[in-house]
Amino acid sequence: MTGPTVLVSKTGALGRIHLNRPEALNSLTPEMIRLIDAGLDRFEDDASVHAVALTGEGGKAMCAGGDIKFVWRTGRSDPQQALSFWAEEYRLDARIARFAKPWVAVMDGLVMGGGAGLAIHGAHRIVTETTKFAMPETGIGYFPDVGSTYALARSPDEMGTWIGLTGAVIGASDVLAAGMADVQVPKDRIAAVLDDLAQGRPVAEALQAEAVQPGPSDLRDNAGLLRAALAGEDVAAMLDRLAAIEAPFARRTLDLLRAKSPSSLVLALHLIRLARGSASLEASLDDEFAANALILSQDDFYEGIRAAVIDKDKAPKWSPATLAEVDAHALIAAIRPQPSLFGARRG
């Protein structure tokens, strides 16, 4: 494909940032992150722009995540290059959260990993009947990042813990129940919303005019089970509690967790719990960045990406292979604070 990977344009009062890498499900590259940031510069200084909308090309995905192949290729040979990618991405996520003008993320189709980072911190987050949302990182030897730990930690009834640990794909109703989105709009009415915004209609009014009631939510329906099973800071104890619950949702959750990298489950839970006490999104992003420096030295990260996107055999061999073999204290203690991405040093 030729042409810019991000299309930045303006229609009336609406600034548009359109991800244009459909052959890769609009997965983020370093170049795309810089183009989005430049688009924000442009719209921030344009008084005629009242709101900015984020969309994705191709109809299948808003954004399926960061370009993990890039990190996989550079992580061992040039870890600083891999860390620089994350640093730029995290600064962009924080900027979106603080952006002075309404940020309207159209979470249509696949929204995963780095794509979620572009969406969930914005002022207005739209889902459609085709939304497929996930933070699938524990399945590739990694952990939920892009500031998601901050959002997941604030999700009700341990829904965020479930999303972050299982990596499961969820639809619009569950995304709304978990507080990762604000409103559902039919896919065929998104254009009408964008037209209204271009005409200068207030965002809340434009969204309300097209909003529909979400359907049933598995997460909401199982809120009591989630609170009972996923409380605390011990992944092994969570699995034991799930195993004792005679319910299909508990068995499904147990199966999902058993397939993930044991080390990633420990790191993910640690970071989500740490984020509960974070004073800001930026603080959680700094904590995630510090964990990135550790993850680049861990075999599971490279093995997970190999199995998922390089060889695609879907058969990772985790090391350690079981939770019982993970020294959680030593793993967490190995995370070394890094200079803050946002100025002052932390830790």
Image (cartoon, grey):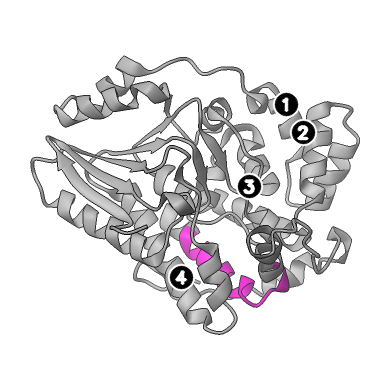
Residue at the spot of label 2: 228
Query: Is residue 38 left or right of 109 when viewed as pictured?
Result: left
Mark earlier in primary sequence (4, 1): 1
| For residue 164, side relative to residue 111 (left or right) | right
Which element type, helix, strand or loop, lies under badge 2? helix
Q: Residue furthest front?
A: 1
Residue position marked by numbered label 1 in the rendering: 224
Task: Tell me whether the residue at label 1 lies in contact with that at label 3, contact meaning CB atoms closer than 8 angstroms.
Answer: no
Residue 272 horizontal/vertical position (percent): 61, 51
Mark 3, residue position: 164
Q: Is residue 263 visible?
A: yes
Which of marks 3 and 1 precedes in the sequence?
3
Q: Which residue is mark 4?
A: 346
Q: Earlier in the sequence, mark 3 or mark 4?
A: 3
Amino acid carrying label 3: it is: Gly
Badge 4 amino acid = Arg
Q: Is residue 168 above or below residue 333?
A: above
Quadrant (top left/top right/bottom left/bottom right) for the N terminus: bottom left
Q: Position of residue 9 (x, y in %)?
A: 19, 46
Secondary structure category for the residue under label 1 = helix
Crowding around mark 4 (Cα neighbors within 10 Å: few <14, some 14 to 19, many 20+) is few
Q: CA distance from mark 4 to mark 2?
A: 34 Å
Q: Let me know if residue 215 is in the magenta part.
A: no
Q: Which residues are magenta?
A: 285-300
Disc 1 residue crowd, few under 14, some 14–19, many 20+, Cα 10 Å: few
Residue 287 colored magenta?
yes
Q: Nearer the viewer, residue 113 or 342?
A: 113
Disc 2/disc 1 C-alpha distance (Å)? 6 Å
